[in-house]
């Protein structure tokens, strides 16, 4: 079985809820969970078996999900926590590859 990357997620909600929100709190939670499942599997697929040639470590990726109740928008960002700069470049290239 190939080495899997370490993928962690942080969820946050900000802002005041609109008087008639498009999504209720349980729907926001479902949105977080679906996004986590989809992104988690995509990242795991792209980085499966990828290890640093120098340090033999797998990639660590932190995904931040931020839902703003005021604008009813979710921002997704991620950071890669590599063992070295060369491995960072390789991981970012793989993550940005379409497919």
Image: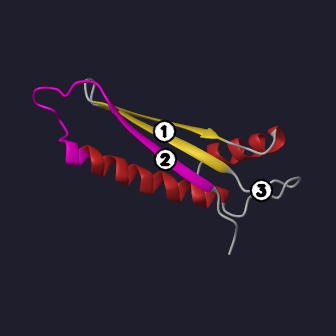
Please state the extent of the stretch shown in magenta in the rendering. 6-27
Label 1 crowding class (10 Å Cα cut-off): few <14, some 14-19, many 20+?
A: some
Q: Earlier in the sequence, mark 1 or mark 2?
A: 2
Label 3 crowding class (10 Å Cα cut-off): few <14, some 14-19, many 20+?
A: some
The N terminus - image quarter:
bottom right
Q: Do the residues labelled 1 and 2 touch (CB within 8 Å)?
A: yes
Residue, x 81% and y 42% (percent of image)? 84
Q: Is residue 95 above or below residue 13?
A: below
Q: Earlier in the sequence, mark 1 or mark 3?
A: 3
Q: Residue 57 carries which label?
A: 3
State the residue lying farthest toward the bottom: 1
Q: Which of marks 2 and 3 is nearer the N terminus?
A: 2
Rendering coords of residue 33 (x, y %)? 36, 53
The quarter of the picture where residue 69 lies is top left
Whether the magenta-drawn stretch holds residue 48 is answered as no
Label 2 crowding class (10 Å Cα cut-off): few <14, some 14-19, many 20+?
A: some
Question: Which residue, given by chain and number where applicable, does mark 1 sit on?
Answer: 64
Question: Which residue, given by chain and number where applicable, does mark 2 sit on?
Answer: 9
Say which element carries label 3.
loop
Say which element carries label 2.
strand
State the residue lying farthest toward the right: 54
Rendering coords of residue 41 (x, y %)? 51, 59
C-alpha gap between disc 1 and disc 3: 22 Å
Rendering coords of residue 90 (x, y %)? 76, 45
The quarter of the picture where residue 44 lies is bottom right
Q: Do the residues labelled 1 and 3 touch (CB within 8 Å)?
A: no
C-alpha gap between disc 1 and disc 2: 6 Å
């Amino acid at each position: 079985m190939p080495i899997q990357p370490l993928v962690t997620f942080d969820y946050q909600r900000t802002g005041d809820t609109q008087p008639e929100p498009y999504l209720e709190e349980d729907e926001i939670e479902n949105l977080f969970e679906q996004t986590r499942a989809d992104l988690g599997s995509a990242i795991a697929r792209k980085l499966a078996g990828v290890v640093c040639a120098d340090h033999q470590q797998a990639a660590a990726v932190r995904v931040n999900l931020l839902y703003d109740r005021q604008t009813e928008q979710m921002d997704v960002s991620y950071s890669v926590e590599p063992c070295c700069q060369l491995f960072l470049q390789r991981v970012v290239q793989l993550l940005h590859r379409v497919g």
